[in-house]
Amino acid sequence: MSHVVQGYNPRTGEPFGEPVAKTPDSEVDRIASAASVAFSAWSVVPAADRAVVLEKVADALDAESSLLVSTADGETALGVPRLTTELKRTTNQLRLFAEVLREGSYVEATLDTANPDIIPPRPVLRRVLRPLGTVAVFSASNFPFAFSVAGGDTASALASGCSVVVKAHSAHPSTSRETARVVVDALREAGAPEGVFGIVYGTESGVALVKHPAVRAVGFTGSTGGGRALFDLAQGRPDPIPFYGELGSVNPTVILPGAATPDIAAGFAQSLTMGVGQFCTNPGLVFAPSELVPALGEAVAASSGGAMLNERMCDSYKAGTDALAASDLASVVSTGVRPDEAWAVAPLLFTTSVKVFEENLEKLTEEHFGPAALVVTYSEPSELHSVLAKLPGTLTGTVHAAESDHAEAGAVAEILRHVAGRLIFNAWPTGVAVAWGQHHGGPWPSTTNPLHTSVGATSIRRWIAPVTYQSWPDALLPLELQDANPLGIPRRVDGALVVD
């Protein structure tokens, strides 16, 4: 067994960068234990001071953008323009959590005064959300910055007051190493406790991390199989811990008759092939009138694929799409252009009827991670109601409709809200804004917990848990709960929201 993690250039298939040594269990133990010690100091750093630290990390990553982007491009083939944008998204995410910390409502401070006249009598109760401890973060393959070493899980966990240990993804070890270097240096220069952030490499180190007693929660973005294995491991510990996994998603798109015009096809093909289809929000399942299929097919045929992130993904995409093409469940509408690169694939569009789809729903909702989609044709929108309700959990549900379709669009949305975490109207699901109102989650298998999001301000809630202080002296309470509200944060007092 190799003792190193080696990156590769997906365009050539050749090794890229210096190999990174896998982290042995003894070193995982040291890093996790150091993170646990650092948590004790980091968790009591005032939120406003943590906000400053996050901004300094963001500034440091921006300052090293040229090196980070060029390294990631050589290791992922995602392209400099895409990676430049992704790194900026990553630093903006850190800055968003600085805003969240200064605003303060994320702790959900709740104060109840004493009332001896009700049954049962009510003592003085003060409730607040406090950080859990050390968080293990598993990097994603398809976002080497935004869902990786310094991505949303790391940013939100550090913001909450938790320490973080990242398990680097094997597809981009050099990018992970360089990003971690920047983060560690920036945290040290900002005065954060030593060990508040660490990184480990290799599959075995990830298993050891989930099992480590210092780890109090896990964030994961990746495959359903890998996520389920780690989820079971987290739940099987002597002390089960929360596991927040973002797994598979087919992202159904419903195109209603009024919107079924040739113009919609170009937008679909662009969304389908963005990042070579390696987005968790890729529109892989489309419900459309049969007359729209030729236009969709032409748009896909005119589009180009590209190199997948690694050889395993390339092989999996080919195997899955070849099997679908060889089956009698769907037919190939069109094939796009395959570039002459080592791990390149071509876009593919399949079609089937709503009847065949509903009869073979489990098989036809398998995710083909890459630029492939299945168009399910219907005659009347009402045919879709029963099948949409049976779809597996998904991150997004999209509806394209003209004004004449609005009543039906509302009916479809009411069905999709039970299976999707984000509902999109007349747009495409690729692209997940980092914002206060964002929700990036959904029922299984899109996430392991339909209540959580891995993007947006409320993603911080994964790493904090409620504590109620009963009858404690004011001076001994956390600042968020003291009578004078020294932080000036929004609080709920005797049931009424008070914004200072």
Image: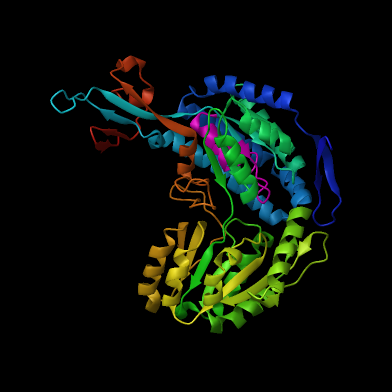
Count every numbered label the image shows and give the total: 0
Residue range highlighted in magenta? 137-162
Q: Residue furthest bottom?
A: 291
- Residue 158 visible in the displayed image: yes
The residue drawn where x is 20% and y is 23% is 114
Question: Can residue 147 be seen in the rendering of this structure?
Answer: no
Image location (x, y in percent) of residue 445: 54, 52
144 drawn magenta = yes
Q: Position of residue 265 (x, y in %)?
A: 58, 75
Give the residue at the far right of this rendering: 14
434 or 471, nearer to the observer: 471
Q: In the image shown, does 9 or 231 lie closer to the viewer?
A: 231
Residue 102 lies left or right of residue 262; in this view the side is left
- The image quadrant that residue 219 belongs to is top right
The image quarter in which residue 480 lies? top left
> What's the image's color scheme?
rainbow
Q: In front here: 91 or 428?
A: 428
Between 162 and 98, the residue placed more toward the observer is 162
